Image (tube, rainbow, N blue to C red):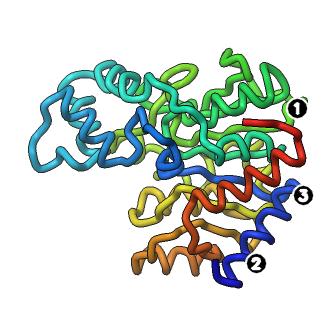
Amino acid sequence: MSDEDERRVSVAIEAMRAGRVVPYLGPDALTLECEVQVPATPEALAAFLTARVSVPHKIRKRLTQAAQFIENFKHRKSLVAAMNAAFADTPEPSELHWAIAASGAPLIVDAWYDDSMFAALRTELGDSGWGQIQGLAQSEHPGQWTGCYDAKGSAVPYVDPNWHTLLYRPLGGHSPAGNYLVSDSDFVEVLTEIDIQTPIPAVVQALRRGRHFLFLGCRFNDQLTRSFARQICKRSSDCHWAVLPEEPTRMEARFLEEQHIERIALPLGAVAAQLHAITTASSGAIH
């Protein structure tokens, strides 16, 4: 661990303990599982979908295009059924999920479809005092950008002011209602409005204000992930961190600089272990 990486991890952990950090999880968080039970990358998810439904060869490895083909030529219900099958199993939460669940963070962003973070929060926090907001596809919910659910998974009309933690899943998620933003048309609808923040709930906009983001298990090597990250952390603080053990691509490096994101060049598991040690020591939880 370099001195600079050690400093950045220490600063991020201290800020998290003070409630000033928004953990932002990407699909690579699933790489910490001993046995991943669900697709953990866009490529793996594309392979899962196209194994169930035949799509043209040239788009078989392109998740959003493959999903759009299934939606167009089979039906939206077929796409949702395939997504439900892909994420039917709930991977055992890792040290990272447990640490975030125990951290007391007012806002957590989970930018993948699996239920690991949801499961960790239900175990750690129980059936009250927290809830989640999920992105909704306009094809299924015209004019409604998000759905709100309490800790038990019941749909509710709004965020309860007594919730201490809000889980924001901008791409939707498997539980509790099988909401997914995954096809080209899903994302076109959102990206058309996201610059003016329409799809991002007001409560998320309020909770991010002045806070730092800690990106965990995220890559920024495509325009879609960069667009969501850029707009979700808009009008927050001017200092963030991303755990990126691999050397960033040219576009990733440009994005990090543009968004004032300091790279922590350490394995995700090493950072997760430090977060877990600190949060469980503070809460007394054992996982």
Residue that extends furthest to the bottom in the rendered view of this protein: 3
> Which label is found at residue 18?
3
Query: Nearer the observer, disc 1 or disc 3?
Result: 3
Does 104 appear above or below 196? above
Inter-mark Cα distance, 1 to 3: 20 Å
Q: Which residue is mark 1?
A: 161
Task: Please indicate, yes or no, whether residue 23 appears anywhere in the rendered image.
Answer: yes
Mark 2 lies on residue? 7
* 46 sits left or right of 25 in the view: left
Q: Position of residue 216 (x, y in %)?
A: 59, 57
Residue at position x 27%, y 41% in the image: 46
Q: For this view, does 65 lie left or right of residue 115?
A: left
Q: Residue at x 69, y 38 (%)?
A: 167
Amino acid identity at mark 3: Ala
Query: Does residue 58 lie above or below 223 as drawn?
Result: above
Q: Secondary structure at mark 1?
A: loop
Label 1 amino acid? Pro
User: For the view shown, which residue lies furthest in the left direction?
Assistant: 57
Position of residue 232 relative to residue 177, above or below, is: below
Residue situated in front as seen by the camera: 92 or 196: 92
Where residue 159 sits, quadrant-wise, is top right
Asked whether, in this view, residue 110 is left or right of residue 65, the answer is right
Which callout, 1 or 3, points at the residue further toward the start of the chain?
3
Q: Earlier in the sequence, mark 3 or mark 2?
A: 2
